Every structure is written in C-alpha cells, then in structure tokens.
Image: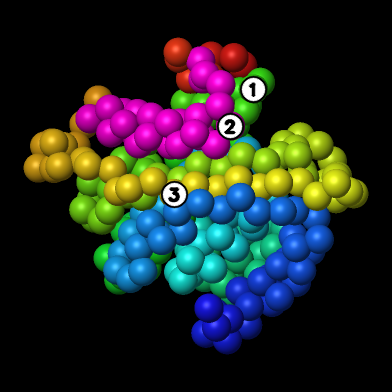
Amino acid sequence: MRYGRLGFWYRLVVVVVKPVLGVTTSRDWRNQDRVPKSGGAILAANHVSYVDPLTLGLYVLEAGRVPKYLAKSSLFEVPLLKRVFIGANQIPVYRGTADAANALSAAVEAVESGECVLIYPEGSATRDPEGWPMKARTGVARLALQTGAPVIPMAQWGPQELWKYKSKLPHPLPPRKKVHVITGDPIDLSAYVGKPITVELLREVTDVIMGRITDLLIELRGGQPPAVPYDPKQAA
C-alpha cells in the first residue's frame, strides 16, 4: 500500500519499524485476504508481546487497511510515544475511570465512520504461563453489539521470542524470530443482536470471540489451551 496517506507520525513509525522487523523476524502470514478491504470493522486479536502491535499492525497495513488501536492510557504518558500516538490518532483507554466510556465512544465513532479498529480483548499481554489467551475484558463485545460491525478474529504467535512480556530488553540477535499471524472469517454474532445488553450477555459474547481467537491460535502453534482461561484477578 502507499504509506503517504498515513499521515506523518504513522508513516514515520512504518518507515522506521518495517526495516527493523525485516532483519529481526521472518513471516508466516496467513489469510490476509480475510481482512476487510473497506468499511467499518473490528479486528480482535490475542496479545503476547510488547512488540506484537508492530508486527500485527504491519500485517494489517500490508493487507490494505490502516488499523486504529485502542491503547492503554499509560502509553500516552511516555513523551515520544505520546507524540506518535496522538499524531497517529490512536485511542487511549483509561481503565477504571469515568473516561473509560470515552474510549468506547471514540471506537464506536471510528467504526461507524468506516475505520478499522484493532483491539486486544485481553487488555494487555497474556499472563498465562504457556502464552494462551487469558480471560478477556468485555469492551470488544460492547463495541461489536453497539456498532453491528463485523468482528474479525486474528491470532498471532512468535513475537514473544523477539520481546517477551516483562523482559526489560528485546532479543533481536539472530536467528530471526518467525512471526505467525492468521485471520479468520467474521464471527457470527447474529444470535445476540437485539437482546438487552447485560453483564451476562457481554461476557457470553466476549467468550465466543475469544474462543474463535483461541481456535486460530491452536492452528498456528498446536497444543491444547487450558479448559479455563487464566484469570489474572484470581491469580493476584
């Protein structure tokens, strides 16, 4: 795609990051054609690494869409990242505050205006010891039900080898780390349309979405996830 239409800050990240990823990673990119070419869409993915927003973002960009992220508000407090995130028009999420609703409103507005919103339902990189998706927050379900936009599940594996969560520094030395990404078909949520939006409904829809993401992750890495997803609140 032509990066000129991204805007200065978004384009700057791409032209800096793409060559770095080119020498530190190799690709196993599958089903890029399943990323919608136009119209409002919600991309929902698992989160395994500090660096996977970059690897996944490049996958989406080269599929022809410009992803708009929901990102933790703390990232907007880091001086350089703040300029990049604001300049690239990303959406801050203020957890546990009255401003949290504003993030959802901004995401709804973005989707309804035809943008492609990329969301990590887990909220942060998984704490599961084996890297499987942990219990997700319900914002993705609320966004899907409020907009009626297609929810496209995605799974990724491998970026944690480049920069593992809680590791202070990345590990860019050879061999190159293989980054696996796969996109699934839109999730059928028609059974939930028109129902009152309750806590129980949001949890059920979230679990449906995470179940599909987990199925895709099994396809990428093999193995079997735990019967009950890791819950960081119970582990605390």
Looking at the image, what colour scheme do you see? rainbow
Choose the circle earlier in sequence order: 2 or 1. Answer: 1
Disc 1, SS: loop
Q: The disc labelled 3 sits on which kind of residue?
A: Thr
Query: Is residue 214 inside the magenta stretch?
Result: yes
Q: Is residue 223 above or below residue 190?
A: above
- Any part of residue 20 in sight: yes
> How many angstroms separate mark 2 from mark 3 (CA)?
14 Å
Nearest the viewer among 199 and 38 is 38
The span picked out in magenta is 201-226
* Marker disc for residue 130: 1
- Any part of residue 94 in sight: no
Disc 2, SS: helix
Nearest the viewer among 36 and 14 is 36
Pointer 3: what residue? 183
Q: In the shown orientation, is residue 51 left or right of residue 72?
A: right
Pointer 2: what residue? 221
* Residue lying at 51% horizontally and 15% vertically, measured from the top left: 226
Query: Is residue 162 inside the magenta stretch?
Result: no
Say whether marks 2 and 3 touch (CB < 8 Å). no
Nearest the viewer among 27 and 91 is 27
Q: Position of residue 61 (x, y in %)?
A: 53, 68
Disc 3, SS: strand
Q: Is residue 37 above or below residue 212?
A: below
Q: Quadrant of the C terminus?
A: top right
* Residue lying at 45% horizontally and 13% vertically, measured from the top left: 227
Q: Nearer the viewer, mark 3 or mark 1?
A: 3
Q: Is residue 27 above or below residue 66?
A: above
